[in-house]
Amino acid sequence: MAQIGYARISTKDQNTNLQNDALKKAECTKIFTDTITGSKAERKGLNEAFNYLRSGDTLVVWKLDRLGRSLKHLIETVTMLESKGIGFKSLTENMDTTTPGGKLVFHFFGAIAQFERDLIRERTNAGIAAARARGRIGGKRKSPLADPKKLALARTMHKDKNIPIKDILAALGVKKSVFYKYIKQSTL
């Protein structure tokens, strides 16, 4: 039943002294560290901590943002720990999932995150419905060269060596890469 610490800093210009001091004061027997931005999914020190932790242990961080890249990621991580019988503590936010109150706060965070995801989904669907009502259809726009007549025109223009490519592109309203993609496909 050990308390295992995890500290993370974003750049080499920073140091973990503040976090390490707080984790030692919280009686962490081992501390794992990373020097990497929180947005990176692969964190060596955190993975080492996960491999070291055993059922009954508690992962301790100085602050919630040291562990999770986002609220969703934080909830997924703590849920994974909980499924393995491992507790979680955040010293700054005074959250401790080994206590009933800490579990309640954590589940409240989870409910807020789910609420936020549902709101985003609802707004997205409403936006799509409003666009459809105005006659807009979602999805990737088709290239003008998807039209067989325009593709035939493009091929004819391309065969005429007196017409510069930039003029063909301007006349058809396509990018060079798209033009050559369609020309190549049509010659196969």
Image (tube, rainbow, N blue to C red):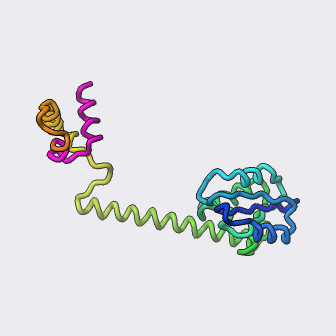
Position of the C terminus by quadrant: top left
Position of the N terminus by quadrant: bottom right
Look at 26% across and 45% down and name the residue there: 175
Asked if the magenta segment contains residue 53, the reply would be no
Foreground: 46 or 121? Answer: 46
In the rendered structure, the answer to whether residue 162 lies left or right of residue 29 reads: left
**Residue 53, percent across and down?**
81, 53
**Residue 96, percent across and down?**
76, 69
For residue 18, above or below residue 139: below
Look at 60% across and 55% down and name the residue there: 40
Look at 71% across and 74% down and name the residue there: 93
Foreground: 145 or 55? Answer: 145
Asked if the magenta segment contains residue 172, the reply would be yes
Foreground: 43 or 133? Answer: 43
Q: Quadrant of residue 70?
A: bottom right
Q: Quadrant of residue 21?
A: bottom right
The secondary structure that dominates the magenta segment is: helix
Look at 75% across and 58% down and name the residue there: 33
Q: Is residue 96 visible?
A: no
Q: Which residues are magenta?
A: 168-188
Q: Is residue 85 visible?
A: yes
**Residue 181, percent across and down?**
29, 35
Q: Quadrant of residue 164?
A: top left
In the rendered structure, the answer to whether residue 92 lies left or right of residue 123 reads: right
